[in-house]
Image: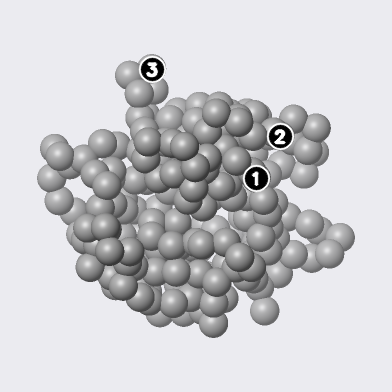
Amino acid sequence: MIKTISKNDLVSCITSVKNAGDKDRSIVNYSEASILILFVNNYVENNSLILMTKRKNNLRKHAGQIAFPGGRKERVDKDLKDTVQRETEEEINVSKHNYDIIGKLPKFYTGTGYVVTPFLAIMKQNSEWKNLIRPNLNEVEKIFYPKSYHLLSPKFHMREKPPINSSMSMTWKINYNDENIWGLTARVLVTISAGLGLREFPPCDDI
């Protein structure tokens, strides 16, 4: 049973996952990006939530998809940590002062031309994030907080063929209410689940 996800849990996960990302390849044809997997712990109820967003349907890329805060590295960013902090603040109005980044996972390559570095973080207990958080309505349709149990439990993970217009050979999907969590978002969650010792590591041959 997954309860509160601690800093030690994430450190252990990062250590376990260090060789579990996609096979290294040239990134010449990929755009660098980073995403933030942000855990929100409820110590009263002894559980963890994971902050997620649903992208607007009118966006040019990844329209309507369930995602984590984050995006493409820009010239103003000195590194991918800067990228994810900037993008998170732009998308949901939560600055880096409200959470602690514990570390990062290996790179993941997408069929849409991105090489993505996921960062794992925990919201600070004394943060005023609840008074600050709001979606950037130019990009984000909504923000929601599934329990870690629903996203990291293997019984909710499915391996299946991707949509017809996808360049992937196979993909992951996670059943959560009526939300369609698939592709990179699902693959990162499945990998975190494996890093926490909840399942075997997933194959890295989606593209």
Find residue 202 and report its horizontal and vertical position in percent. 35, 73
* Local crowd size for mark 3, using a 10 Å CA cut-off: few (<14), some (14–19), many (≥20): few
Residue at the bottom extreme, as displayed:
155
In the image, what residue occupies the spot 35% across and 23% down?
A: 74
Residue 72 picture quarter:
top left
Mark 2 and mark 1 in contact (Cβ < 8 Å)?
yes
Q: Which mark is residue 133?
A: 2
Q: Which residue is the site of mark 1?
A: 143
In the image, what residue occupies the spot 50% across and 27% down?
A: 86
Find residue 192 and report its horizontal and vertical position in percent. 48, 64
Q: Which mark is residue 76?
A: 3
Kindly report the distance in space between the C-alpha atoms of the residues bearing marks 3 and 1: 26 Å
Tell us which disc is closer to us: 1 or 2. 1
Q: Looking at the image, can residue 175 be seen?
A: yes
**Front position in the image: 138 or 196:** 138
Q: Is residue 90 above or below residue 170?
A: above
| Residue type highlighted by circle 2 | Ile
Q: What is the secondary structure assignment of the residue under circle 2?
A: loop
Kindly report the distance in space between the C-alpha atoms of the residues bearing marks 1 and 2: 9 Å
Quarter of the picture containing the C terminus is bottom left
Label whose residue precedes the other's in the sequence (1 or 2): 2
**Front position in the image: 8 or 144:** 144
Kindly report the distance in space between the C-alpha atoms of the residues bearing marks 2 and 3: 24 Å
Label whose residue precedes the other's in the sequence (3 or 1): 3
